[in-house]
Image (spheres, rainbow, N blue to C red):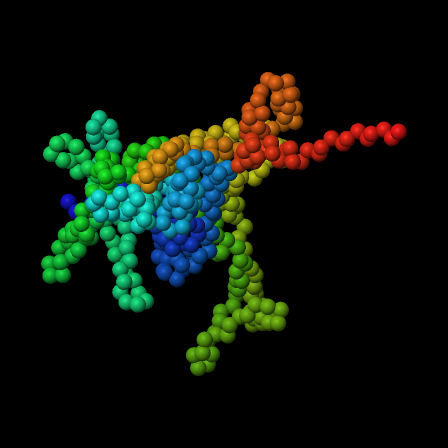
Amino acid sequence: MSVKYQHPDYVAMAPLWKRCRDAAAGQSAVHAAREEYLPRLKDQDDKAYTAYVMRTPFYGATWRSMAAMLGLLFRKPPTITAPDAAKDLLADVTLSGSPLEVLAKTLSEEAITVGRVGLFADYPEAAPGTTLADAQRQKLRPSLAMYCAESIINWRFAKVDNTYQLTLVVLVEQRLDRVDEFEDKAVTQYRVLDLESATDGSHHYRVRVFEVQKDPNTGIERDVQIGPTVYPTMGGKSLTSIPFWVMGVDDLTPTCDLPPLIDLVDMNYSHYLTSADYEHGCHFAGLPTPVVSGYAPINGPNGEPPEKLYIGSATAWLFPNPDAKASYLEFTGQGLDALEKNLTRKENLLAILGARMLEAQKKAAEAAETAGLHRAGENSVLASTAQTLSTGIQKALVVFCEWAGITGEVVFSLNRDFFPMPMTPEQLTALVQALQGGAISFETFFAQLQAGEVIVSTRTAEEEDAARKKDTPEPSKTPEAVE
């Protein structure tokens, strides 16, 4: 079996991922796919089909819904707790200038789009016996890298030391090889991460990189390893697990989850097909067609084509036959109305399936509880995704810090408070009374104000207390009596 072998679940899910990505990319991607999403009409030539595609708009419900979910997820910044020594490293976790928050947002967008994303923690190869001081002097440091669903082509999940974990993952990558001073060539390579079994029953993390090369004479492909086999270590010891986490909608297992918005995506394509019928009908039936009866065009004496009939106020038609008639043929049926109603119906279905921001707002305001019930489905999917991403990123951060020789508590949590619930005046008054009566501490009072979004979440209780004291005027002194 070749290194480029694809897991059966990968083969089954790849078409769904493409549908989701094209819908999220919008009209340009959908139009470029042509007959994949819009079948050609019977006997329609290329020119007519191209015009047919270009007349049909793609309703951008998918991307708007994804952007809305991402906006809710990052309505508040993620909670990050890490030792001070990790601050500089977290400002660039990818070695390409991306801080942790930016990487988390990219991971979240991938998870919302296709329901699957990978996160890889890595450390550059160091010479045997390299100490932490040596690594710091050589500026060796860990990094995190995202792998999209299409890059994770094969995996194996098995029981090792009474724990189910990844024992194999194959990642397809693109590297650039220099051709000349100005040109680079993209080369496909396969990074294989696995656990190698030792004779004593232990397991050691191993990294290998392969290329698939074709024999120029026979055309037969073979796997060729590029570079040496690497056994990454941490603190001088081999790793016993693969530092790669597959994050789905529900959990961290490599099992493929359905994209969270796949029903919305499919309805978006159904709307696209109906739009094509509607626009096609408008194009051919919407414009009046001139009709002439009782007149037969006659060729010229030398076989010239008959004179053309031009339309406009500057042109008069004179027919020798007094019974000749000229009129306009106009569409009067109800077919287009039915298509228009169907488009509206599907737009409402899109709103129900996730794109609530596209739904026309009712004049009467909804109660907060009612609005929450309407969005319960989206909340549950988004909350589950946020939980999975938070767990995966936190696990990667723990390994990241351990590799850097940094110890201490590491916590990462994405926002789960998706809809603001402002504190009412009555609630605020009750809190102030509880504080004044000694029923709650200032820290509890402050935390409740943050939860009610009266005070920004990034400010600490100490900062708020200092600002309060600074803004409170000193009491005026009582003037002394003049004798």
Q: Which quadrant is the N terminus positioned in?
A: top left
Q: Position of residue 452 (x, y in %)?
A: 57, 29
- Residue 327 is drawn in which quadrant? bottom right
The residue lying furthest to the right in this view is: 483
Q: Which quadrant is the C terminus positioned in?
A: top right
In the rendered image of this protein, does residue 194 appear above or below residue 34?
above
The residue lying furthest to the bottom in this view is: 302
Q: Residue at x 30, y 65 (%)?
A: 183
Is residue 12 at all visible to an observer of this figure?
no
In the rendered image of this protein, does residue 144 appear above or below residue 451?
below
Q: Residue at x 26, y 60 (%)?
A: 177
The residue lying furthest to the front in this view is: 483
Q: Position of residue 368 (x, y in %)?
A: 57, 28
- Toward the viewer: 200 or 475? 475
Q: Residue at x 28, y 58 (%)?
A: 176
Is residue 60 at all visible to an observer of this figure?
yes
- Residue 393 is drawn in which quadrant? top left
Q: Residue at x 24, y 52 (%)?
A: 189
In the rendered image of this protein, does residue 331 appear above or below residue 129?
below
- Toward the viewer: 369 or 279? 369
Left or right: 442 in relation to 154 = right
Left or right: 92 in relation to 13 = right
Left or right: 471 in relation to 270 = right
Q: Position of residue 334 (x, y in %)?
A: 52, 46
Q: Position of residue 403 (x, y in %)?
A: 31, 40
Counting every numbered tag in the picture gives 0
- Toward the viewer: 30 or 119? 119
In the rendered image of this protein, does residue 478 appear above or below residue 40?
above
